[in-house]
Amino acid sequence: MNRSHASSRVSALRSVALNVPDLMRAEDFYTRIWHLEVVARSENALYLRGTGSDHHLLALHQASGPASIRCVTLRARSRAALDEIAQLAPTVGGRVLQSPSPLSEPGGGTGVTIADTDGRVFQLVWDDQTHADQGPIKDRPIRLAHAVLNSNRIDSAQSFLETVLDFSLADRTRIMAFMRCNNDHHSLAFGDTDNNGLNHIAFMMPDTDSVMRGGGRMKDAGYAIEWGPGRHGPGNNAFNYFIDPFDVVIEYTAEVQQIDDHYQARGPADWKWPPGRVDQWGVGVGPTERLKQAQRAVKFAPS
């Protein structure tokens, strides 16, 4: 395995856009229970922020049918990076869905939208609006920690991110490739399965105590912990996993490992657990069968 490196084209994960069948129910869940804040809305869409500087972490759009993912939005390091990405994507089998141009949606900026070889959609934005950072607030998400996407061709998915977005591999387990763009251990990851949809979205909490209290708050609201509490191997982050009202898997996490360009990526032989163990602590529930099904339920909307 090679050393990992920060991306020269992408600085961070910003947000995820989803289609949901009931926008009113989504607003109630993600504000009252999940503790995000509405920052913008239109007749058919809702934008929710955390306590950090990102304009929004979730964009929720009203649409019929089961929930689906519209795109993952990443922040580009420069305006020139948008052009580089648009030029590189078609050379490795991707598509440019929207050439670099000003964005009219809340958050603004200039953006390019691409699809990878299996139809996963990424939007890259530069010079988008930000907020004053409110600082860590107990029990409230700060920003997105990572998004995990499914892949039935994990090597191809990894190669696309490396070539087009200049991500690098942080660690590889038997079933997952963890991809890095900044000092977070991973901002994106691919899970080896039979589709190319959304696996889960992770929200960064101020500390592990907030992850635990969030688990209690979700249980009080009728949403069971489907996996956790625990601490992952790759990334070393504490976690609790849940399923939202639309079968979207969401995670509270904290204490994500910070790495630099001296970090040596490790392979499947380095990440093995004793029989019956799936995390460092080995004290939590799950992952439940319901969680495993939900991790395969949310597909990308046609692009």
Image (spheres, helix red, strand yellow):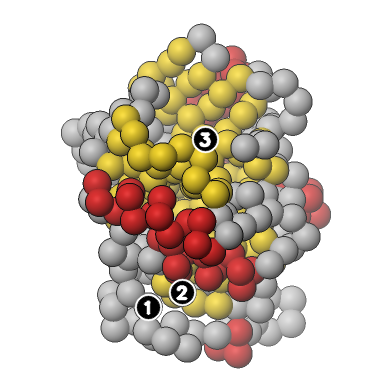
Q: Residues within 10 Å of mark 1 (few under 14, many from 20)?
A: many
Q: As displayed, is residue 64 above or below residue 145?
A: above
Q: Residues within 10 Å of mark 2 (few under 14, many from 20)?
A: many
**Residue holding disc 3:** 17
Residue placed farthest to the left in the image? 132
Q: Quadrant of the C terminus?
A: top right
As drawn, the label of residue 153 is none
**Residue holding disc 1:** 4
Q: Do the numbered discs 2 and 1 sit on residues whose CB atoms are within 8 Å?
A: yes
Q: Nearer the viewer, residue 126 or 224?
A: 126
Question: Where, by quadrant of the figure, is residue 243 drawn?
Answer: top right
Give the SS element for disc 3.
strand
Q: Name the residue located 57 percent from the left edge and 36 percent from the top edge.
A: 70
Q: As displayed, is residue 193 above or below residue 295?
A: below
- Residue 152: x and y in percent read 72, 63
Q: Nearer the viewer, residue 13 or 245?
A: 13
- Residue 244: x and y in percent read 64, 36
